[in-house]
Amino acid sequence: MAFKDKLRELRDSQSITQSELAARVGVTTRTLQNYEMGRSYPKNQAVVTKLCFVLGCKPSELFSVEEEFVVEAAEAHGGRGAARAKSIIAQTSALFAGGDLDAEDREAFLRAIMQIYFEANRRAKSDAPQKSE
């Protein structure tokens, strides 16, 4: 189940309106509506933490590993990072379109790719020439 569906299901199960949840999390109602329509994801971990606190869940219960990757990449590298994460997911998903991996192995593979992605970005940033003043 996708983040948008899990979010709506958890909110509905607790009889919380979109406006109430938005206020408790510290986002606009429109932002929450965009989450529930699948138009966007939380842009930082603070929002994820607040959503999970209010809804009484863990991030792993709210996001698939793919969605988690997109959220973390967006927080670390902005829109470009999110777009790269989505591209990586699409490319790796195509590798296993034939169903060669079970769900557990697929998740482990994606988590390994996430680690490689973030480590490569960290190294690239530290290896970049420093600006002189």
Image (tube, rainbow, N blue to C red):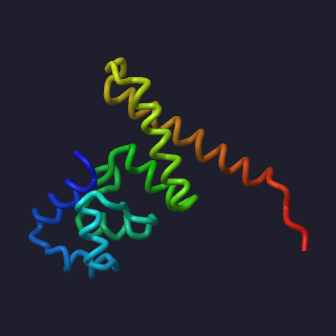
Decide which of 84, 42 is in the foreground and name it: 84
Q: Is residue 93 above or below residue 123?
A: above
Q: Is residue 112 above or below residue 16?
A: above
Number of numbered discs on residues: 0
* Residue at (44, 39) in percent of width and height: 89
Image coordinates for residue 18, horizontal then vertical, percent: 18, 74
* Residue at (10, 62) in percent of width and height: 13
* Residue at (73, 54) in percent of width and height: 125
- Which residue ends up furthest to the right in the rendered image? 133
* Residue at (44, 64) in percent of width and height: 45
Decide which of 46, 128 is in the foreground and name it: 128
Q: Is residue 11 above or below residue 103?
A: below
Instruction: Assign the C terminus to one quadrant of the image.
Output: bottom right
Q: Is residue 125 above or below residue 102?
A: below
Image coordinates for residue 101, horizontal then vertical, percent: 36, 21
* Left or right of 92 in this view: 20: left
Image coordinates for residue 58, horizontal then vertical, percent: 31, 56
* Left or right of 104 in this view: 119: right
* Left or right of 3 in this view: 119: right
Instruction: Assign the N terminus to one quadrant of the image.
Output: top left
Image coordinates for residue 130, horizontal then vertical, percent: 85, 61
